[in-house]
Amino acid sequence: RKEVEQDPGPFNVPEGATVAFNCTYSNSASQSFFWYRQDCRKEPKLLMSVYSSGNEDGRFTAQLNRASQYISLLIRDSKLSDSATYLCVVNKKDTGRRALTFGSGTRLQVQP
Amino acid sequence: DAGVIQSPRHEVTEMGQEVTLRCKPISGHDYLFWYRQTMMRGLELLIYFNNNVPIDDSGMPEDRFSAKMPNASFSTLKIQPSEPRDSAVYFCASSPSGGRGAGTDTQYFGPGTRLTVL
């Protein structure tokens, strides 16, 4: 079983739509959770951290369910510029908080 | 401010040749990470350093791979000899030290080196 699992997509949505991505992780001891964004042929960039109580940054909302080992990302009012691959990230098993494990990513295509 | 700098951006080499990838982390960052990304395996952590000391190299695929960090502003990832299956994008990332705040977990990636081994 992969340490971090994501639906690869692609998710094809119209502009203005709301879209949600889910992610599950296998290590119950994981302490840090993030969503990174990667544009085609570019490097990953931090989109947002995910806190236990859930957090929001503009149109983006992240949720964490430790009991189910599940992380979600909700994007409201999708823009064309949101088209990218979204990577779910957790800290790696047994190697401390600094080593991160990346999911394989969910591709989003927002269409006009 | 300059971000993480990697060179070369593209490298094409023949099987059996030595390849050296270079990285300059963001000034003041104490952590440096090397990743490899392929379509099949996604983004994999190869090794990371803290204050120039290797902390976890469990992701290094085999002895053909080696990484060094001789000082706080420079690291290399070397593949010798290279094989076609090493073809991938290699990313370097750096991260600041500090407390347990989320900001200190953020990793800043360089633009990557696209390696093709023929």
Image (spheres, helix red, strand yellow):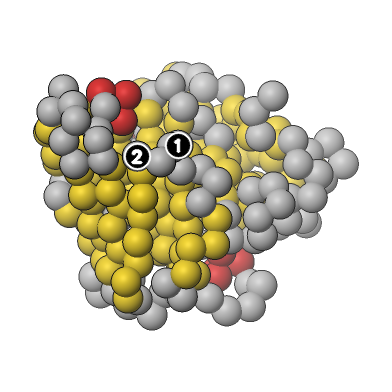
Specify the amino acid type for callout 1: Pro
Query: Residue A15 shows which numbered tag?
Result: none
Q: Quadrant of residue A101?
A: top right
Residue A110 seen by the camera: no
Residue at 61% x, 66% y is B102
Expressed as whole percent of the image width and height from the top left, the position of residue B5 reads 23, 61
Residue at 31% x, 30% y is B86
Do residues under tags 2 and 1 come within 8 Å of each other at their CB atoms? yes
Q: Describe residue A17's horizontal placement relative to residue B118 as left or right.
A: right
Please give the residue where the numbered disc 1 appears in the rendered image: B61
In front here: A109 or B84? Answer: B84
Expressed as whole percent of the image width and height from the top left, the position of residue B51 reads 46, 75
User: Comparing marks 2 and 1, which lies closer to the viewer?
Assistant: 2
Q: Describe residue A26's horizontal placement relative to residue B70 as left or right.
A: right
| Quadrant containing the C terminus of chain A in the rendered view | top left
Specify the amino acid type for callout 2: Arg
Taking A18 as reference, is B104 above or below it?
below
Q: Quadrant of residue B15?
A: top left
- For label 1, count other residues whose C-alpha is less than 10 Å away and answer few (under 14), some (14-19) or many (20+): few
Residue B76 seen by the camera: yes
Taking A69 as reference, is A1 above or below it?
above
Residue at 74% x, 46% y is A64
Expressed as whole percent of the image width and height from the top left, the position of residue A82 reads 40, 38
Taking A9 as reference, is B87 above or below it?
below
Q: Quadrant of residue A48?
A: bottom right
Q: Secondary structure at mark 2?
A: loop
Kindly report the distance in space between the C-alpha atoms of the residues bearing marks 2 and 1: 8 Å
Please give the residue where the numbered disc 2 appears in the rendered image: B64
* In the rendered image, residues at marks 2 and 1 fall on the same chain: yes
Q: Secondary structure at mark 1?
A: loop
